[in-house]
Amino acid sequence: MTGSQPDPGLVAQLLGRAAYGFTQMQPMLPTYLHLIVSALFPIYAGAHASLSRPSSAAKRGKKKRAARAPSADSDDEDEDDEEGEEEERLMEGLSPTDALLMPLFAGCALASLYFLLKWMKDPALLNKILNGYFAIFGVFSVSRLVTDLLDSGHSLIYPHRHALDGTLYHVNGVDEKAEPVAGLIKDKATMTSPLPGLLARVPLPARGRRILWADRAMPGNKWTLQFHLHRKLAARFKIGPHGMVGVVAGLATVAYFNLVDKPWYLTNLLGFGFSYGALQLMSPTTFATGSLILGALFFYDIYFVFYTPMMVTVAKSLDVPIKLMFPRPGPTDDPTAPPSHAMLGLGDVVLPGIMIGLALRFDLYLFYLRRQKRIAATVEGEEDTVEKPQYHSLAGRWSDHFWTHSFTGRPLWNTTTAAENKLEAHFTFPKVYFTASLIGYTLGLLATLGVMMVWNHAQPALLYLVPGVLSSIWLTALVRGELNLMWQYTEAVEDEEQNKKKAGGQSAPNDVPQNIPGKGEGDDKPEKTKRLASHRPEREVFSFSIESPWKSKQSHSAGNEFVSGKATHKSSRHSSEKHNWVPSTEATAKTEPAGKRVRLN
């Protein structure tokens, strides 16, 4: 006689259900891993691309222009002088009002698209109209993404500094050599190879070295495009080889997507470009505003996914690059079923991403804030002054860090003195809040995918992403005792010229006023545009010119310039080189990226 088997315990039941769920999920694991990596890529890249000088660091000084006699080329020389000035770009600063308006506008747009699709029944025409609209932005966004990727790859091959045999070398692009500056520099000669690290030991012929040095200088040699419309517009734009490749890639992507086919990988490429660009253009301004906006969109996403069919219907009906798509395996019982895709809306990337980008910029702010020095007042009654540290651009520093540090962060050159320890102090900075927000975002994605697998229903991703990102940031500040500091942090910086006028002070000679109201008609134009226009002849109505980045070997054909469709000759300001591409100068090698300032709404 056999007795009845005892029922399994609660733990055994839970383990059994977990094992069964993992077996069901296993075919989808590559798709989910692809989704997570694809969502993190534009956030990580866009957040780092948005870095600029924080208010806790000293502003870079501007070089004074040397006096010179006026010449026919004076306007071009003035424009070249402005190259050294730190350009200040605007980020769109979001306000608390946007927390109410963004869900309202998004809901109206979503409802309009939904009822339009129901009325049209066939979304083909609407898809063509929307794809034409997104094509304009697609060219610029993909071009920017591809250009920056090429620049990053180039900087990895040709860093500004690298370490070899315990010695730190700085690469001098002008003299085409790498000089030992720290570590075991005794009896170490300069190297003539532009390659870093162990690659510098590869024997190269003289011609090969010249080609590599020219290739190292290649991104800095840019074509100059100038456009002038009498009393209306004066623009100057530079584009290098990487930018040209980016434009071609953007045009090819948009053309193929709209005219040939819409594969998932091109949809993702356009989505990456849109997200990457948006993270550099928008800022929540403060952590309170960002939390308020995400909180409002949290309820918006829940309502339109769970309580209406609008969001799911629009996402499945519109074949436009407003989502990321990931191929998923077909059902095992029906091998003839058409391929399906998992989807993630760009809003689920960009909206939490702007908060993650703010966290990274806050990390940079704290890094320089902790390096400030307070100088006691020498006269009684005066206030102590604060000396801000000098800002060092992080552009290209990650590749320098790769070639000069181990994977654990230990310097690969022998630092024997305190001075040498401080020689290369700004390769990177602690990214506590950024790392915490990325972890919270990843956990939110995992929760979204898990619930979607269990309930087999589309999930509002912001339902899980918003708590993951916000809780990780605010809890990190609570644990570190920096809640008050984070609450007071803001990226809304008023123009310094206006601040000085409010304080009753005079502007410095080198300060450039930006859009100061009350100056009469035409004075609200950007200062650089007014300076460019002021050097144009009064009778010049329209002109367009292209200036090459190199000097031709024949002196009489140097610097061909096409002005208003007619070829003219101009003397080049570059010295003659052994090759067409002009090697980068020391100033070019240390040029910092344009700073960004947040406009107050």
Image (cartoon, rainbow, N blue to C red):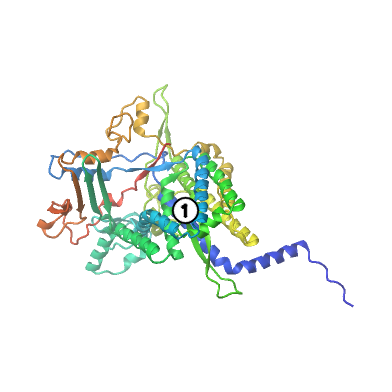
253 versus 291 height, above or below: below
Measured from the top left, where is residue 273 in percent x and y?
Answer: 41, 56
Question: Dot 1: within a 10 Å radius of its alpha carbon, few (fewer than 14), some, or many (20 or more) residues?
Answer: many
276 versus 502 height, above or below: below
Residue 187 visible in the picture: no
Measured from the top left, where is residue 157 in percent x and y?
Answer: 34, 62
Q: Nearer the viewer, residue 107 or 128?
A: 128
Q: Nearer the viewer, residue 457 or 169?
A: 457
314 versus 337 height, above or below: above
Tally the marks.
1
Q: Is residue 555 left or right of residue 10?
A: left
Q: Residue furthest left?
A: 556
Can you tell which quarter of the image residue 502 is in?
Answer: top left
Q: Is residue 190 left or right of residue 295?
A: left
Residue 72 visible in the picture: yes
Location of the N terminus by quadrant is bottom right
Q: Residue furthest top?
A: 381
Q: Which residue is mark 1?
A: 43
The residue under the point 70% across, 65% down is: 17
Q: Hey, what amino acid is under mark 1?
A: Ile
Location of the C terminus by quadrant is top left
SS of the residue at dot 1?
A: helix
The residue under the point 46% across, 38% down is: 490
Q: Is residue 180 left or right of residue 37?
A: left
The residue under the point 40% across, 63% down is: 257
Measured from the top left, where is residue 261 in percent x and y?
Answer: 41, 66
Q: Nearer the viewer, residue 36 or 11?
A: 36
Measured from the top left, where is residue 344 in percent x and y?
Answer: 52, 57
Q: Residue furthest right?
A: 1
Can you tell which quarter of the image residue 342 is in?
Answer: bottom right
